[in-house]
Image (cartoon, helix red, strand yellow):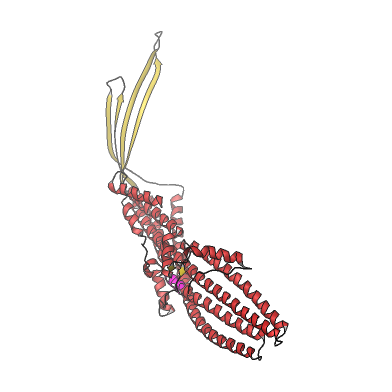
Amino acid sequence: MSMMGRIRTGTIAGVAGLCLAIAAPVAARAESLADAMADAYRNSGLLEQNRAVLRAADEDVAIAVSSLRPVVRWVGDVTRRFGESGTGGLPARSIGESTASLGLSADLLLWDGGRTRMDLDIAKESVLAVRQALIGVEQNVLLAAVQAFMDVRSSYEIVTLRRNNIRVITEELRAARDRFEVGEVTRTDVALAQARLAQARSNLAQAEGDLAIAIESFRAAVGRAPGNLTPPPVMRMPAGSVDAAKSVALRNHPDLRRLQFEVTATELGVRKARAATNPQVTLRGQIGVTETFDSPDFSETGSIGIEAGGVIYQGGQLRALTRKAMAQRDAKRAELLATQRVVAQNVGTAFARVQVAQAALGAVDEQIRAARVAFRGVREEAALGARTTLDVLNAEQELLDAQANRITAASSEYTAYYGLLSAMGQLTVSDLRLNVPQYDPTAYYNMVKDAPSAISEQGRQLDRVLQRLGKQ
């Protein structure tokens, strides 16, 4: 069924004009549900935002790596000393001397009880957690695209249904007027048909308004206006039972995997806090040169040594930090347990919604068949004078309601199906095999994990990547 068309004008011209203006530019392009999801993935600003958050987490690994490497510093100094000196009754003598110095120093951490190494491990676990959070955002983006796609399709079908209803009621009104002219019905029958026609026009205006709203929601979710939306593919249940679906979700859902990595990070945080009382050993070296202007004085100095030290007492801060880290670990463990229950509940709810939608769709198909037979029968009986105009209008309304329910039920079935995929953690570009270039969360990490310097080839390549990202 075509998704775009000319929208009726008249008493509803304002809303209809809006729908037509939105829909017309893309009326010629057919697109599937997979196309809409692929474009939502490609155009999502929310995904771009969270990819940047992931790149920031990747840099935390580089920062932790740099703490294990030597720190080299330089310092330069130019000094002018001046004053006067004199003894006894002798005139004062001016003193002036200018010196310049340049020094280099380097520090290398040799041992700190593993605290810095644990910072690196915590950063790596945090990166894995943020990657899972990105998958969760991806699921939300694709599910919103599915909802927007189905809303536009169902809204357009309801608009078409409302237009057909107006045509049928207009014919009934014409027939009532003809029968009134020959004295077969009263003016009441004509008024009933007129009232029902006015109501049908009001319902059409509401349906066209819903279509305009659905189109705007599609723009927000997919990043463009909808084209000629084709029927979605035939669905099949992703799991044979609710228990099987829950088992998949408890293994794969990104929210659970994210929390598992965060729990590991907080456990490392406890170990790091406990290691804070360990001494720190540092290798330190420096070299410098000093030259005096207008003088042959020149000196060079250098030193190298190992420095060790640690905290003996810090007002109870170290113990407080340890207890805080333990509390954060316990909170994250509790959050993981609570989320496991929520994920299982969401899977059960989504599974039930699919079953309900399937049953409702079967029942409404039976309703449509019965209502269609009833409407045809009532209309024929009315032509023979055995039924009133009101009977015909009521039978037609029942058929219309059943057809509208069928549209809503079909849309709900597809939405429930993809909602179940999301609850199981399988609503991703990879799982759906969408035809769209996928973002590689490891590419940027592999470029920065060794903390390349700006003067290296890898560092220059990274600068070029950042420039391209900034232009997007």
Residue 180: image location, x then y, percent: 70, 84
- Residue sitting nearer the eye, 349 or 295: 349
Is there any visible trace of residue 303 in the rendered image? yes
Indicate whether 302 appears above or below 359: above
Main SS category, magenta section:
helix
Residue at position x 30%, y 19% from top?
294
Is residue 110 visible in this depiction of the protein? no
Residue 315 is inside the magenta segment: no
Q: Is residue 84 above or below residue 166?
A: above
Image spot of residue 344 (x, y percent): 46, 73
Report the number of discs.
0
Q: Position of residue 49 (x, y in %)?
A: 44, 56
Look at the picture and state if 67 lies above or below 365: above
Q: How far from the left and from the top, in percent, is residue 90?
A: 39, 8
Nearest the eye: 31 or 85: 31
Q: Is residue 178 left or right of residue 455?
A: right
Can residue 419 be found in the magenta stretch? yes
Query: Magenta part of the protein: which range?
Result: 417-424
Seen as rendered, the residue at the extreme top is 89
